[in-house]
Image: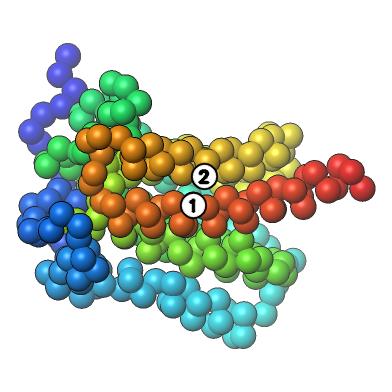
Amino acid sequence: MQFFTDNCPYVPDLFTPLTDTLTHRTPIVMSEQPTVYETFIAPIMDMNPFLMLHILSPFMYMGFVYLITRTISPCPNSGIMKFARKYHNVGLSILSAAMLGIVIIGSLYDQKFDDIHSTICKPHSDHNDWIVLAGTIFLYSKYLEWGDTLFLHLSGKPISMLQYTHHMSTALLVYVVTIDGVIVPATPTFLGINCLVHIPMYWYFAFPRGSLYPFRRMITQSQIVQHVICIAFTGYSFVADDCSDGFVGRVFIVVMYSMYLIFFTQFYIVSYMKKKTD
C-alpha cells in the first residue's frame, strides 16, 4: 500500500514565505561560520512583513499581558469564562494531537525514525510539505497559547514567571529554528515531543477533576523530561560529525530549554515535593 504521493497537503499562500524557508527553496549563501546578518537579517529581508512580527513576539506578549491585567477584571465565577476556558483547552489538546499525527507522517516520509542519529541529525527533504504544514500550524499555535495567560488572569490567579517567560518566548524560539540558514534537523522531533506532552496537559486543564487528575504530577514530570530530551538531543548534535545545520538555532534551543527546565523544575518542587513534606 502506498502511503505517500507527490500530492502533499496544500499550504495557504499566507504561509508561503515560511514554507519557502523551511524547504530551502530560496537558499542563502552562507559562510562556514554564519554571521549575525546571514543568520537573522538576510532571511528576514526576503520575507513577508507579517512574518517579521515573530521577532517582536516577546514584546507583543508583554503588551498583551499589560493590556489584559489593566483593562480586564478577573471573573473567576463567570460561567461564560469557565465555558470558554474549558473549550480553549480542549481545542489545544485536539490541535496538539493533529499536529503530532502530521509530524509522524512527515517523519516517516523522511525516514527520521530509522535510528537515533537520523532522528536528531537527518534534515527533512526539500519538498516534505507534511513537516512544513506541521511547522506552520505549530508556530501560530504558540499565539493561541497566549489564551492560557488570559484565562489564568480571568480566573483570578497570578501570572507566574514560568507562565510569563514561557509564553513570551516560544513563538520566537519556533521562528528562529525554522528560518533559512538556522533550521535545526531535530526541530520536527522537538515539535512532536511538545505535542505529545500537550495532549494530556491541555485535556487535564480542561477537566482538572476528570480522569487525568490522578496523573497531574506525571504530566508535570513529562514536561521536565521533554526539556531534558531536547537539551540532550541538541548536545548530541554539537558532537556528531554530520549534524551541522542550524548552529545558531541549536544554541538558542539550549539556552531557552535550559530556562524552561529551571522554571518547570522549580514549579514541580514547589507544587509537589514541598507540599508532600509539609
* Above or below 240: residue 72: below
The residue identified by callout 1 is: 257
Q: Is residue 54 left or right of residue 33?
A: right
Q: Is residue 168 left or right of residue 54?
A: right
- The answer to whether residue 69 is seen in the rendering is yes
Residue type at mark 2: give it: His
Quadrant, the N terminus: top left
Q: Residue 265 or 38: which is nearer the viewer?
A: 38
Residue drawn at (44%, 72%), measured in percent from left and top?
Answer: 58
The residue identified by callout 2 is: 227
Residue 199, labelled with which disc? none
Residue drawn at (22%, 35%), measured in percent from left and top?
Answer: 242
Q: Are marks 1 and 2 in contact (CB under 8 Å)?
A: yes
Secondary structure type for disc 2: helix
Residue that extends furthest to the bottom in the rendered view of this protein? 71
* Above or below 176: residue 8: above
